Image (spheres, grey):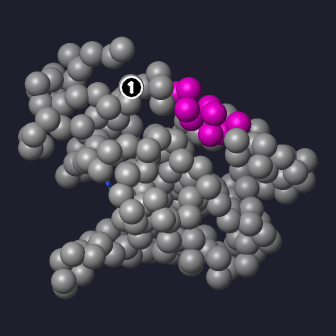
Amino acid sequence: MTTTTRYTSQVPSNTIQVLIDRDRIAVRVEEIAAQISRDLADVRVEGEIVLVPILTGSIIFVADLIRHLPHKIRIEVATVQSYYGEKKKVKQAKIIGALPRNVDGKHVLIVDDILDSGETIRLIRNELQQRNPKSIRACVLLRKQRPTAMQTTCEYVGFDIPDEFVVGYGLDYQSYYRNLPDVCTFKGDAP
Ligand code: IMP
Ligand code: MG
């Protein structure tokens, strides 16, 4: 089991704890890749996957995942910003910049770090669906155990986690902590 001591330069070890350590993540990432490979076995022989990582949270996950995929892969990133609307209760997602256009007839795999409200995955899937892909699938490392997340269609889920704020392995708090190698939670308030 990994200790938190190596984090002390970035965050005091008494304020953070490891929820899923890097070894468990590595094993699970390989399992997900094997599952994707099985589901898209035909594509390995002919065709390609258009992989759509959602920036910025998915960068580390996607970097690890693609190195276990034997397919011909094209990466087309998408940027989504989450914000709260006027009523401040419902989280909404907005696409920043262009989405990949050349997905016509292709197998699309959307990759994100975490499924929280589900808004991001629903939005991207709907947008890309309109561009006539041959198939479309979504993959997240983490899914919070909350109704809206569990009800969102997502073909590949690494870990179901409690409805808590997490950082590390790509996930941030105020743009920091993405480089922590493990998925961590804060004890009490974030520093
Ligand atoms: P959703 O659209 O509500 O499903 O939220 C997805 C996005 O919110 C993710 O891509 C993350 O960027 C961010 N997010 C949600 N929960 C967390 C968390 O616990 N830690 C860090 N980022 C999170
Ligand atoms: Mg994100």
Up/down of 12 relative to 165, above or below:
above
**Ligand 1, image quadrant it occupies:** bottom left
Residue identifier under label 1: 21
Which image quarter: residue 91?
A: bottom left
**Quadrant, the C terminus:** top left
Percent of width and height locating residue 6: 24, 18
Residue at disc 1, secondary structure: loop
* Residue 28 lies in the magenta-colored region: yes
Percent of width and height locating residue 141: 48, 45
Please, which residue is most extreme toward the front here? 147
* Residue 166 placement, left or right of 73: left
**Quadrant, the N terminus:** top left
**Residue type, mark 1 in image:** Asp
Question: Which region is colored magenta?
Answer: 26-34
- Residue at (57, 35) in percent of width and height: 29
* Residue 109 placement, left or right of 25: right
Q: Main secondary structure of the magenta part?
A: helix
Please, which residue is most extreme toward the right here? 45
Percent of width and height locating residue 190: 12, 43
- Residue at (76, 39) in percent of width and height: 70
Q: Residues within 10 Å of mark 1 (few under 14, many from 20)?
A: some
Up/down of 118 relative to 186, above or below:
below
* Residue 135 placement, left or right of 119: right
Q: Can you see residue 55? A: no
